Image: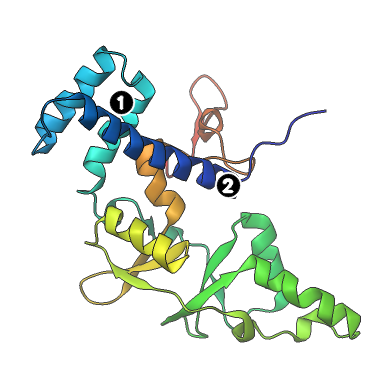
Amino acid sequence: MKEEPPSTEAQLVSKLGIFKRIRNNLREIYRKISFKPVNQNELASVLKEAEENNIIDKDVLEMMEETIEFASIPVRDVMVPRSQMISINEVDSIDELIDKVVKSSHSRFPVFNEDESKIIGIFLAKDLLKFAPGLIKEGLDISALNIQEIVRPVNHIPESKKINVLLDEFKSNRSHMALVVDEFGEVSGLVTIEDVLEEIVGEIEDETDIGEETKIIQKSEIEFVVNAIT
């Protein structure tokens, strides 16, 4: 029987565990050296020396090096642009909503108002499941459910916010998504905790993601099909 790949949520938990181990490794390194680095260059040198002395392995070194750069990365560099956002409208029917959930395999969606001039919150796919048993039990048609009843509030953050600060906010707020606004206050994209963690630990993929090998497909000797965001 083919083993199912881990879910995105399971991978995120695993990656957060790796993040904690990186922090613990740094503490161990500091205990074994005679000084504490005062800037990024000194820290990079210390990490390289630690790897050469087998205190840490190469994979941990690479993640630590990514962590050093982590604090300097703005949200605009990791966000999903507005043009690529998969969203829903507050007047969408439940059938349309379910169709988008199934086709996209996403778990969170920004929700626009009727004329799409404003995002009023986010929709969590799991919230739809909470209503289904009750509607079925009462003999009601699920299509009678109003999307506005299950929209949750969403945080808005500036493009310039550093992703290390955002990660702390995600953890303290127990949230996984935020909307990104430009200098004019207009929504320019969205960012998830997965986008942030991938800057340290690399691509997090599940069974619904397009593999690298399928992003460029050769149709003939002179014809290729290329994913537009490759």
Query: Of discs 1 and 2, which sits in the foreground?
Result: 1
The quadrant holding residue 203 is top left
> Quick one: label 1 or label 2, which is nearer the N terminus?
2
Helix, strand or loop status at disc 1: helix
Q: Is residue 209 left or right of residue 171?
A: right
| Residue 65 percent coordinates (x, y) | 26, 32
Identify the residue at horizontal 56%, vertical 23% (top origin).
Answer: 220
- Residue on which the image places disc 2: 8
- Residue on which the image places disc 1: 61
What amino acid is found at the position of numbered circle 2 in the picture?
A: Thr
| Residue 197 percent coordinates (x, y) | 40, 46
Relative to 100, say whether 91 is above or below: below
Helix, strand or loop status at disc 2: helix
Q: Is residue 95 visible in this depiction of the protein?
A: no
- Which residue is nearer to you in this view: 61 or 222? 61
The quadrant holding residue 124 is bottom right
Q: Is residue 167 visible in this depiction of the protein?
A: yes
Identify the residue at horizontal 31%, vertical 69% (top origin).
Answer: 157
Which numbered dot is residue 91?
Answer: none
Relative to 19, say whether 42 is above or below: above
- Which residue is nearer to you in this view: 22 or 188? 22
* For the residues bearing labels 1 and 2, Cβ distance under 8 angstroms: no
Q: Is residue 208 left or right of residue 68?
A: right
Identify the residue at horizontal 35%, vertical 73% (top origin).
Answer: 156
For the residues marked 1 and 2, what is the alpha-carbon distance in whole angstroms?
24 Å
| Residue 193 percent coordinates (x, y) | 43, 55
